[in-house]
Amino acid sequence: MSHADKLQFSSENYSGQRSGTSLIVTGAVHGNETCGTRAILRVTRELAAGTLTISRGSVTFVPVANPLAFTKGERAGDRNLNRNLFPNPHPHDFEDRVANWLCPLLAQHDVLLDLHSFSAASEPFVLVGPRNNDGPLEPFKHEQQERALARRLGVRRFVDGWLRTYGAGVQRRLSGSSELQTVLRYGMGTTEYMRSVGGYGLTLECGQHHDPQAPEVAYRAILNTLAFLGMIDAPEPAPVAPEQMEALSMAAVYDKLHADDTFSRNWTSFDPVRQGEQIGLRADGTPVLADFDGRILFPDAAAEANSEWYYLARPNLSF
Ligand SMILES: [Zn+2]
């Protein structure tokens, strides 16, 4: 048996005596992002000790969604679990087998809180889903509930528009292919899967991987979620004040075209850019300029050719 063959999948459930929402909280979807794991273990210790009680509904905790990536201390085991997340009747890699366990579990719940961290020193933010729509890419009808919960997680930065923007990049890379299934295959992560089975979900990026505050952000978000959904006897958390909110809508993804394309400086997510400002330099010497005033998101200096290099987001005044 290889090391990976000895790994198993684990969740812990607490249900109240009264009916209510069914929530699932996941950590370590990316194995080096452990703030969620630590926060979940803190909450389940309190539940086991009886200092915290689920009174309504049911909550399932998955402290380590990807045990292979977690034991490696790396983002992925065989591949990124947060892409192409579907049940697979012919699993080829470790993440396919995680999906065959995790997807049916997600589908048993109404709401997902997925806890992540990131590499740059920056402020926590939450990724929210699309507006209500019945379009083909990501039909959705829980915009109000999802955004109401997002406002109560304890963070002030909000980003939407990921799948739409990412999908446009995938289609461009596949030279105009409009294969919706292809976009979905690449773009389907935990929250996208949750929405595809009728629920809603948020990805909370709790801080830098090693920031001691990140597990605190994750812990507060779990408790706020339980309180907001009425699952514990606690005051309803107040939403973030509108004047404190910073909401962004992802508008475009830019690809590295050549491995030697370089950034003009060491960009960090949420760095502001002005229209015409130089962001980078193509390998052939062509400058890469910002198309509009906005913020840089997810810059990846180590990206390979023909893959996502950075995103641009616009202020979202109607969040
Ligand atoms: Zn992550």
Image (cartoon, helix red, strand yellow):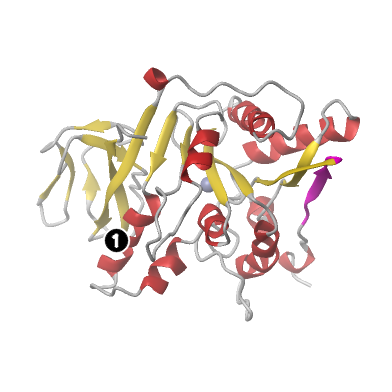
| Residue 260 seen | yes
Residue at mark 1? 168
Left/right placement of residue 302 relative to residue 21 reads left
What element does badge 1 sit on?
helix
Mark 1 residue crowding within 10 angstroms, few (<14) / some (14–19) / many (20+):
some
- Residue 134: percent from the left, percent from the top? 40, 60
Q: Which residues are magenta?
A: 10-17
| Residue at 70% across, 58% down | 108
Q: Is residue 301 above or below residue 210?
A: below
Is residue 14 inside the magenta stretch? yes
In-front residue for pair 59/17: 17
The C terminus lies in which quarter of the figure? top left
Which amino acid, by three-letter code, is at mark 1?
Ala
In the current view of this chain or complex, which residue is farthest to the right?
A: 49
Q: Is residue 231 above or below residue 233?
A: below
| Residue at 82% across, 44% down | 15
In the current view of this chain or complex, which residue is farthest to the bottom?
A: 90
